[in-house]
Image (spheres, coloured by chain):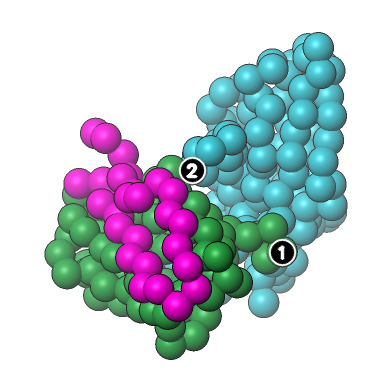
Chain colours: A green, B cyan
Amino acid sequence: DAGVIQSPRHEVTEMGQEVTLRCKPISGHNSLFWYRQTMMRGLELLIYFNNNVPIDDSGMPEDRFSAKMPNASFSTLKIQPSEPRDSAVYFCASSEGPRATDTQYFGPGTRLTVL
Amino acid sequence: AQSVTQPDIHITVSEGASLELRCNYSYGATPYLFWYVQSPGQGLQLLLKYFSGDTLVQGIKGFEAEFKRSQSSFNLRKPSVHWSDAAEYFCATANQAGTALIFGKGTTLSVSS
């Protein structure tokens, strides 16, 4: 298996622009997670899906952030409008199930820079 | 609320020397505990995990960790470090619902020759 695939790997945009990050989970995995990593706050869970349904989005910073999972093989994280403080590395992870006992497999991340 | 603390931000170890990375957790019941490694420019990879049972857990790449309830610790160890072990290491626990991971701030390991 190719593992979790994220695109783009790097994104540089200007403040106010819309940014869309993409994730393809491992085939057969039913849970998908979006994390954000910054120097100040470390790794934070933004939202996770189980069977394409958002289960917990309490980590989403504000209304500028939205996530969708239209099918089992694709998810997007959108920021609109983007701000410089959104600069971070965004990771997608997937697991077979929603329990903590299910190993999460991480993608390589998308490094977002908002100027 | 569940949390983990990694007291050391950065550690340097000589190649071939032993390694111990510290992790303390805060939770009354037996927690779910994990160690992940992040190599530069890469995503996180699970090294090992503890849910219950034997308190000494073996993982990949020659790593092990020991759960000590009396010390609220789950320290990661390796008897002999290789240069390729240079990376950032994250301790994590699960949230109360047992569905999401809560990560520590990480410890950066440098290996000197």
- The image quarter in which residue B21 lies: top right
Residue tagged 2? B43
Residue B110 or residue A105, whichever sits in front:
B110
User: As displayed, is residue B65 above or below residue B67?
Assistant: above
For the record, the magenta segment spans A1-27
Where is residue A6? Give x, y as percent. Answer: 34, 49
Q: Quadrant of the C terminus of chain B?
A: top right
Q: Is residue A15 left or right of residue A68?
A: right
Secondary structure of residue under mark 2: loop
Q: What's the distance in space between the residues labelled 2 and 1, CA to CA?
A: 18 Å
User: As displayed, is residue A33 above or below residue A110?
Assistant: below
Tag of residue A95:
none
Q: Amino acid at mark 1?
A: Met
Q: Residue at x 40, y 46 (%)?
A: A9
Whether A6 is among the magenta residues is yes
User: As displayed, is residue A9 above or below residue B105?
Assistant: above
Q: Is residue A57 left or right of residue A71?
A: right
Q: Residue at x 83, y 35 (%)?
A: B11
Q: Residue at x 55, y 65 (%)?
A: A115
Label 1 marks a residue whose chain is: A
Q: Is residue A95 left or right of residue A41?
A: left
Secondary structure of residue under mark 1: loop
